[in-house]
Amino acid sequence: MATQVDEGDDPYLWLEELEGADAVRWVRERNLETAAALTDGEAFAGLRTEIRQVLDADDRIPYPGWRADGFYYNFWTDTVHPRGVWRRTTLDQYRQPAPEWDVLLDLDALAAKEGENWVWQQVTVLRPGYRRCLISLSRGGADAVVVREFDLVRRDFVEDGFALPEAKTDVCWIDADHIFVGTDFGPGSLTSSGYPRVVKRWRRGTPLSAAALVHEGRADDVSVHAWHDPSPGFARDFVARSLDFYRVRKHLLTEADELVPIDVPEDADSDVHRMWLLIRLRSAWTVGGVTHPAGTLLVTPFDAFLAGGRDLAVLFRPDDRAALSGWAWTRRHLILETLLDVRSRLEVLTPDGSGWRREPLAEPPVGRHSRIVETDPDHSDAYLLDSEGFLQPATLRLGQVGGPVETLKREPAFFNPEGLAVRQFFATSVDGTLVPYFVVGKADATGGPALLTGYGGYEIPMTPNYSGVIGRGWLARGGTYAVANIRGGGEYGPRWHRAALRENRLRAYEDFAAVAADLVTRGITTPRRLGIEGGSNGGLLMGVMLTRYPALFGAVVAHVPLLDMRRYHRLLAGASWMAEYGDPDREEDWAYLREYSPYHNVRAGEAYPPVLFVTSTRDDRVHPAHARKMAARLREYGHDVTYHENVEGGHGAAANNEQRAFVWTLTLEFLWRKLAGPDRPLPRQVPPGDAAERAGRGIHR
């Protein structure tokens, strides 16, 4: 099959040079322009202070990571510890308004001691025993991490313990002296997406080069990883090879290092808990003469399934309004999280010998979205339940399945909800599909500034959540806030996602445009006062809205966005997303990608709304060149573009709360200035080309 090469007409390839002298100079100049335009004055400073107060509030909920050793673990940042402390306390102490915390690791002290800009990523604790863990730290917030073994008894890193240099590493404990590790072992050990292609078993006290090969995938896979399940009485090892973002081949790894296939559909999610195998379908599956639709959750005894049995019980079947959003095991029960028109429901399923008994879980207050934060499936039927709404701060509760529910913590209110309401509407998209969206603000607001956000990708739903940042920075100023549940997301399960996959991507953008138009039709706002914001895949959404629907909006903000759909698969982790978007090197795929790729659809004579791009030099997932090149092209054509690139921060564009406060203040101040004043005339169109920028383009082509 014929493939396409680069078009050869990209004048800004030099901005892909992450630390190139000319690219760095260009970024510095743009940052100075943005700071001069937006950060002066009392309004910016005051809002940044208020947002920082939200992010650093001492009385916000310290969400715990559940551990079975009698402690609640928490990673915490505040003004005293901007990089954070990893700490723990007992349940009795956690119940107190001001618990006594035992600090295990002070990241600020570690960074100062070692001269590194450490950012906390994650921790993997050895079960059972809970005496050792593997801590992953990144430099500046990147996805690539340094892994080091830590002693939870001595509260210090283990000398000559397991340690791995910076890479996109995946690790898992097998026992106290062995771990599974996928990392950069040298040439050929990574996939084209930059993730481990090879997974090995590493024994304590031996060099990494002596680690034994467990499994390896192909270069065009996304990744390969292995993990150990230490559940008492059901200890097992597993290996998975991710063929693309959605297709995975899983195997049971026997003691003889044989790989036994777990013969579920490659695009299904599967989960093994004790004797049970859960299978959540992304596409229809016919087995035993029965066809189960996408979105169905099935369960079967694991050992019987491996032996060829296909006695599958249906635990959840979707319909036009309901979808499964997640699940969590306790010792003897399964908790299902479902969405009904993007409103959460929780129920408990229990195997009783003749089937699965179901009953509702203790319900949260009306109007709140709920999720299971943690369970302890090895030992108990306890669960931690978090509930929040757009106007209701989060409440964290501890429950026992079939038993009492206790409120442990309440998030403080960061803004006054008086006079504000939450409403849900449905917009009609181009093909007649009804697209839900939420509106938060004064119910009688008409024609004022509004901020609309969305995502629409990777089967990720946009559910109601409480944001002190949006509350203080937007709602309290009189703005309206809206969340669009467009196709491509997971609000209605796999069918909602598949409807906007690859060649059908335009449906997601048509949905978002329909929501924007519906906000105007209802009189909630006007096009000139409607701003939009999104990040990552949502940043791509913003770029498409800018270039395909400019008349619908008064201002656009794109955080860490994808924008160049011709080269996205060649930049950092981009190759791993081709199952979502398509392969630009295939003619038939580039034909539809070219239709909406924002970078390729900028026009000189178009009247675009003003746009702000925010990205990070240390984002090693979505390359900052997407935002750099888009901003440069818009500037070349004389459009109103503002740009900020944080030198650290990773895919979140911020490495600490100070930086997060700055980014959000920049975002909200930009939008408020553009939208809150009187209706503006159409932007003046200047002749294409900035002389200095074109000169730079010629030099670096």
Image: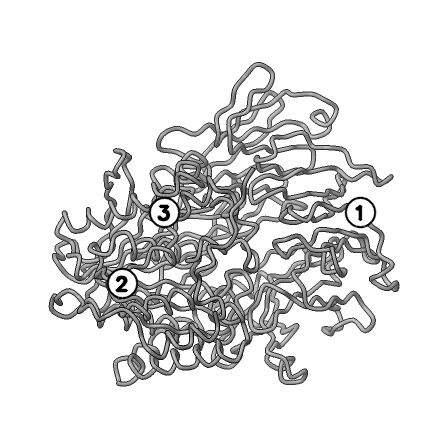
**Residue closer to the observer: 689 or 328:** 689
User: To which quarter of the image does residue 503 belong?
Assistant: top left
Q: Residue at x 49, y 48 (%)?
A: 584
Q: Which residue is mark 3?
A: 595
Secondary structure state at the residue bearing disc 1:
strand
Q: Residue at x 31, y 84 (%)?
A: 36
Q: Position of residue 501 (x, y in %)?
A: 44, 40
* Above or below: residue 463 compared with residue 143: above
Q: Position of residue 591 (x, y in %)?
A: 42, 43
| Total residue callouts | 3
Residue 468 appears anywhere in the view: yes
- Mark nearer the N terminus (3 vs 1): 1
The amino acid marked with disc number 2 is Ala
Relative to 414, is 387 on the left or the right? Answer: right
- Mark nearer the N terminus (1 vs 2): 1
The amino acid marked with disc number 3 is Glu
Q: Which residue is mark 1?
A: 214
Q: Which residue is mark 2?
A: 604
Mark 2 vs mark 3: in front: 2
Q: Position of residue 304 (x, y in %)?
A: 72, 24
